[in-house]
Image (cartoon, rainbow, N blue to C red):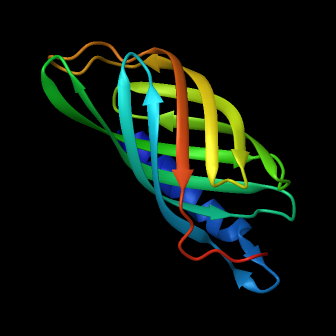
């Protein structure tokens, strides 16, 4: 988990440096809510920050939690994510990586102006949570990203 924390901190620093534009650093940020299926149904909630490293692409960093009810218990699993939007047209194709203490999930998908994201991927189990089933395999997700400080670059 230390390595994941250091990776996210490094990505944030890189993001701040690449996110500089002619008019200064212009991060867009807000909350996100969504649904994911990976060995069961999860409600996803997170906070995110998005910046433009150039005039055509975006990078989003998010941190949040996955909530589920499985095996007669409520479970909350923390998650970190990094999304790279490949274009800034109406439909944004993206590559994403999500990491939890139990799985690593690469994804690809499309986003509608990065507000609604539809993704599919495959989760690779790193370890199994005590008294829980393994979280691995095919992954599908839908997310609604709500920008709180939207602005045009």
Q: Quadrant of the C terminus?
A: bottom right
Give the tally of numbered discs: 0
Up-down: is 12 above or below 26?
above
Nearer to the camera, 104 or 140? 140
Viewed as shown, does residue 43 lie left or right of 48?
A: left
Nearer to the camera, 39 or 3? 39
Percent position (x, y) of residue 16? Answer: 63, 69
Which residue is painted at 58% across and 36% down in the image? Answer: 97
Which residue is painted at 51% across and 36% down in the image? Answer: 98
Up-down: is 18 above or below 4?
below
Quadrant for residue 60, please give it: bottom right
Percent position (x, y) of residue 12? Answer: 56, 60
Which residue is painted at 70% across and 77% down in the image? Answer: 151
Which residue is painted at 70% across and 45% down in the image? Answer: 111
Nearer to the camera, 131 or 92? 92
Percent position (x, y) of residue 66? Answer: 34, 38
Percent position (x, y) of residue 74? Answer: 17, 32
Quadrant for residue 125, please give it: top left
Viewed as shown, does residue 131 lie left or right of 39?
A: left
Nearer to the camera, 93 or 112? 112
Viewed as shown, does residue 138 lie left or right of 116?
A: left
């Amino acid at each position: 988990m230390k390595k994941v924390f250091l990776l996210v901190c490094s990505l944030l620093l890189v993001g701040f440096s690449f996110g500089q534009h002619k008019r200064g650093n212009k991060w867009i940020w807000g909350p996100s809510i969504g649904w994911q299926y990976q060995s069961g149904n999860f409600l996803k909630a997170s906070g995110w920050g998005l910046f433009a490293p150039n005039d055509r692409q975006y990078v989003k960093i998010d941190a949040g939690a996955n909530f589920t009810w499985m095996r007669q218990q409520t479970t909350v699993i923390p998650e970190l994510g990094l999304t790279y939007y490949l274009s800034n047209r109406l439909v944004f194709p993206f590559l994403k990586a999500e990491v939890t203490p139990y799985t690593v999930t690469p994804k690809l998908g499309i986003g509608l102006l990065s507000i609604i994201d539809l993704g599919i991927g495959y989760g690779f189990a790193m370890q199994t949570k005590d008294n829980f089933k393994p979280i691995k395999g095919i992954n599908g997700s839908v997310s609604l990203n709500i920008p709180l400080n939207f602005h045009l670059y």
